[in-house]
Amino acid sequence: MLAPTPFFADRGCHVRILEEARSVLPLGVELRLVTYHIGRDVPGLPVERIPSVPWYGKLEAGPSWHKPYLDLLLLFKALRVARSFKPQLIHAHIHEGAFIGAILKKLLRLPLLFDCQGSLTAEITDHGFVRPGSLLQKCFALLERWINLSCDFIITSAGPTVELLVRDGVPRERVCALMDGVDTEIFAPLPKDEVKALRVRLGLPVDRPVVSYLGLLNSYQGVDLLLEAAAHLKAQGAKLHFLVMGFPEGGYREKAQALGIADMVSFTGRIPYDQAPLYLGAGDLAVSPKISLTEANGKLFNYIACGLPVVVFDTPVNREILGDAALYAKYGDAADLAGAIGRLAGDRELREELGLRGRERAVDQHSWKARGRELTAVYRKILGNH
């Protein structure tokens, strides 16, 4: 399993890698996860790391010009691991992993599964790494297409991504969706007395609704729009509080101060993944203003498993995950986002209804145990065709 990222670093992409590995290990799959030199080891998961690169310590998501030589080290490390481990299949995460996997496929004569979490070109454009319409963007688009067509099979974290790949030339029979999931025994609603105690410990108000956000803090995840929505709500006299959990904080504390909402927003910094169910339990509702139209939105599975009613932008990915268990705001519109948050915060019955509906959806449709069975079936299909 190739993971060209500082695994494990308490963020969405890493959660998918971790939970997929955990879900197939009990089903008789043996694996070795090859990843960068930094990140946290997870008990029970066999991890192999590249040699230490002392000057590189970036844990947050996003492109970097350091990636090419890190990925070269990853290629050499994977070759060494493969010689002793002798795998039957390469499972590559994200486009960089699939690029390395395409080389290993030729050298080792093994089938390659690409775990696609969105469009490479769209991601680097959304992150501001390249300009829309630039020559560099066109080069990345050509590289992305070559990677997609080099794989024996592709699984995507969202259904709409399947259609993007098919339109880009990938045969439909070589791609399917395998959405993220959630462990509904670990991510579950907290008893009300524990919620009150947690709020007191976190210094949160106990007399007004708390709106939770847990994820990376950047414009790509819509955090700027979230703070703008909070400012709209304060201007309208709304009595609520925002619990913003994640990293890197960057200038968001200063932005909250500049918008005049510092008194209604609490920033926690990084939350360890194993503590996420507890911290999510402090909220009355949750929000995910992510603006990507091609990537999955893994935090939503955890939100609804914890019984939290959810506000999101109206996108195909969010609709696929949440169905009718959410309130939807007009895409990219901070004022409409504020309206949806205000409506849900002010309607206890609606919160209870959507929370129950979401929890049922998480249990019935989105468990990692079911995803593990789906993934091992994909493994067998690829090996059967090889």
Image (spheres, rainbow, N blue to C red):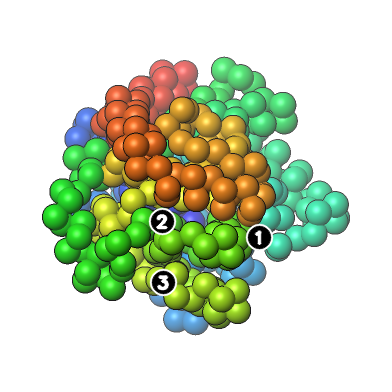
Q: Position of residue 85 (x, y in %)?
A: 31, 46
Residue drawn 49% across the image and 45% down it = 343
Mark nearer the viewer, 2 or 3:
2
> Marks 3 and 1: CB-CB under 8 Å?
no
State the residue position of label 3: 267
State the residue position of label 1: 127
- For the residue marked with disc 1, what is the amino acid? His
Q: Position of residue 256 (x, y in %)?
A: 54, 74
> Left or right of 141: which side holds 377?
left
- Answer above or below: position of 238 versus 314: below
Give the alpha-carbon distance from disc 2 to disc 3, as whole Å: 12 Å
- For the residue marked with disc 2, what is the amino acid? Val
Q: Residues within 10 Å of mark 1 (few under 14, many from 20)?
A: some
Disc 3 element: strand
Give the quarter of the image for residue 213.
bottom left
State the residue position of label 2: 211
N-term mark: 1 or 2: 1
Q: Residues within 10 Å of mark 2 (few under 14, many from 20)?
A: many
Residue drawn 61% across the image and 67% down it = 64
Q: Position of residue 222 (x, y in %)?
A: 58, 56
